[in-house]
Image: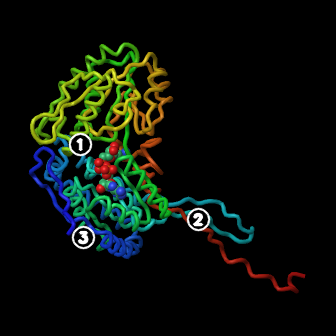
Amino acid sequence: MTEPIRSRSPQNPDDIVAEHAPVAPDEVRRLAASARAAQGEWRRAGAAEHASALRGAADRLRARADSVADLVVREVGKPVTEARAEVGRAAAILDYYAQSCFAATGELLAPSLPADQPGLLFTERRPRGVAGLVTPWNFPLAIPLWKAAPALAAGNAVLLKPSPEALACAEVVGRLFDGLLPDGLLRVVPGGAATGRAVIAAADVVSFTGSAAVGAEVVVAAARAGLPVQAEMGGQNAAVVLPDADPATTAAMLARAAMGYAGQKCTATRRIIVVGDAAPFTEALVAAVAALPVGDPARAGVEVGPVISAAARSRVVDAVDAARAAGGRLLTSGRPRDGAFYVAPVLLDQVDPAHPVAREETFGPLATVFSAPDPAAAVALANDVRYGLVTSVHGRDVGMLLEAARGVDTGLIRVNAPTTGVDFHAPFGGEKASSHGPREQGSAALDFYTSVRTVTLAAPPPPARPVEEAA
Ligand code: NAD
């Protein structure tokens, strides 16, 4: 008998939020077959019906916004202000893809036909079939929906394999569509790696968000099966602070970007690279980090709650110990706090940029401060990791800002804005080990969940003229 998977509240680990038997691979195959059967009906239903289902789900989510936000707080420890913002964003994502159902789905081109044979050459986008979506726990509504909404808008069926740590939120996502879609079109299939692998094997298109290690495995499995695949993975994001940046406001922005939600965002700032003398800025940063309210994420105003699990907390503590053993200096307390999975924000400096703590993602409230002699050296240091998700650059001189931004090797560049924060209507994704395949979100997502057919439609050729007439 397989052990059920359970999600626990990180601020109160005795609180089991949801429990489910992992969906077995055979069952995944059966659900994929029924989703594929429902997909034909859904594709034929057309744009107005697709839009109406997505709007219906958005309305349902807004009507339950407070209770869903409370569930997000409880299940993944997201501070309540951010949890409410995620609910709002999830509803807006549904609205956005509802209106996108009416966008043009092809282009008209000049056909190469004989002069006496009028015709059209056009492209049309067709849904791919069953979208296999594998998602992490940290944005338990927004990420499943920014994959599922464009997939559904384009006429696909969906199998969603959520993170075991965000089971209850995934069930909410599934229920938003109850009665709005053909039976079996969208299925939530809880489970771990085996269920995830089965979803990929059963899908026609695969979208993954999670760690770089799992993402690499997903990409290989999908490629072997000949499936289109996109994978959004980790980041080791840098913020470059130019000498004319205002220390207090920039430090406050970076403290939040690094430590908000206990640093559990792929876009969190992990490395702060100060151009010139780092001491005054570091002092401002330490003060800004110390000022962040840490504690129960359900309490209004708290910005740093617990990390997701005991294992995640150990990873932060171990990373700090390893960095200190190698000469790193701890600028804040950085120790586990009493109870649950809390760990106080950790700022380090004097870390060798080649040390793993500087190069690899520790998915928690941990950031390292470096200094660089000039902007070019800061950009080189920012780029010197295998990841390439997002970089922020801070300062006033537009020329210097643009020069630094131009050199940065990431998919997202934020000038005088935190590395965190994503616009769902703009393409989202990284370079290097952070991403594989086409971008997510915006109209790029609709492209990904469809394939292009090129159609030549010609009038029947004119009848051959009788021989005597021709003479
Ligand atoms: P994870 O890689 O451990 O798990 C992600 C999902 O993959 C889960 O649903 C998991 O059950 C499933 N999975 C695990 N092994 C699998 C396998 N072999 N085959 C198929 N599926 C498998 O990640 P996580 O801990 O849930 O999330 C944190 C990570 O996600 C961080 O690295 C973070 O940077 C990244 N992330 C990236 C983005 C982005 O858009 N770039 C956004 C959010 C989170």
- Residue drawn 46% across the image and 29% down it: 405
Query: Closer to the camera, 184 or 281?
Result: 281
Q: Quadrant of residue 54?
A: bottom left
- Residue drawn 46% across the image and 31% down it: 384
Please name the amino acid that badge 2 sits on.
Thr
Label 3 neighbour load within 10 Å: few <14, some 14-19, many 20+: few
> From the viewer's perspective, is 247 left or right of 229?
left
Please name the amino acid that badge 3 sits on.
Gly
Q: Which of marks 2 and 1 is nearer the N terminus?
A: 1
- Determine the secondary structure under disc 1: helix
Instruction: Tell me: residue 10, above or below residue 283.
Output: below
The image position of residue 196, as x and y in percent, is 33, 61
> From the viewer's perspective, is 402 left or right of 114?
left
Please name the amino acid that badge 1 sits on.
Ala
Label 1 neighbour load within 10 Å: few <14, some 14-19, many 20+: some
Location of mark 2 (residue): 454
Q: In which quadrant is the N terminus drawn?
A: bottom left
Distance of label 3 from label 2 (alpha carbons): 35 Å
The image position of residue 463, as x and y in percent, is 75, 82
The image position of residue 426, as x and y in percent, is 41, 45
Residue 179 tag number: 3
- Determine the secondary structure under disc 2: strand
Residue 340 tag number: none
Residue 134 showing in the rendered view: no
Point out the frontmost of discs 3 and 1: 1
- Residue drawn 41% across the image and 45% down it: 428
Q: Quadrant of residue 248?
A: top left
> From the viewer's perspective, is 96 left or right of 321?
right
